[in-house]
Amino acid sequence: GIIRITPMLNPASTELYYPFIMLAIWGIIMTSSICLRQTDLKSLIAYSSVSHMGLVIAATLIQTPWSLAGAVALMIAHGLTSSVLFCLANTNYERTHSRTMLLARGLQLMLPLMTTWWLLANLMNMALPPTINLTGELLIITSTFNWSNLTIIMTGAGTLLTATYSLYMFLTTQRNKLPTNIVKMEPTQTREHLLVALHLTPMLLLLMKPGLIMGPFTCHYSL
């Protein structure tokens, strides 16, 4: 909605966007910091989405070709990443009946293949190269830096916090000792692995041709 409406507004009103851009960038740091305090797995993933949408809002309000292309790329990439993280969290909940990470830790010993999916999903959430998440974040961070050099401090801090809480989420849920309340656990099912694979396959295909989602903005908008 923001991408469609803002080009129709008066160009003189672009200065009105400045407070909202700064608020969105500041929100990245705040929500990322909240993620580090979470003990509930689904809450952590939800706040992670809010953090990433701060970048998207800032990019759509800046209204440059790179920022719009980055916003669309990050929206699609994080939509898939966040969805697969919720799917993985649900597989944990169905077996442990708890969303508290300390009560559902050490699952690498019980579900080793699911740990591989967790690792891939967290690496994409961290925007590790060469994922489409990185492409979107780089375009947005570059656009915000061209808009104001000071934003690199906040976007850099937000990127660091994102990597921190992603590692915190992975290590807490997968690596520690099994809690005493877990005695036995049902094995994973084929439909669960298929569901995760159907999330990650489009992400990998977009690496081959990112222009499918970024092409319209790079072509029709001029610098």
Image (cartoon, rainbow, N blue to C red):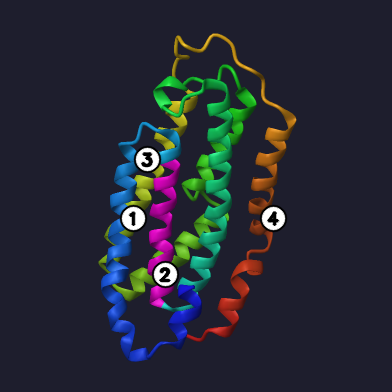
Query: According to the image, label 4 marks what residue?
Result: 205
Query: According to the image, label 2 marks what residue?
Result: 59
Q: Secondary structure at mark 1?
A: helix
Nearest the eye: 30 or 73: 30
Main SS of the magenta part reads helix
Left or right of 157? Residue 213 is right
Q: Secondary structure at mark 4?
A: helix
Q: Could you say which quadrant of the image residue 79 lies in?
A: bottom right
Nearest the eye: 150 or 38: 38
Q: CA distance from mark 4 to mark 3?
A: 27 Å
Query: According to the image, label 3 marks what residue?
Result: 164
Please state which amino acid type lies under the numbered disc 4. Leu
Please state which amino acid type lies under the numbered disc 3. Thr
Please state which amino acid type lies under the numbered disc 2. Ala
Mark sitting earlier along the chain (2/4): 2
Say which residue appears at 43% left-offset and 72% top-offset.
60
Left or right of 172? Residue 212 is right
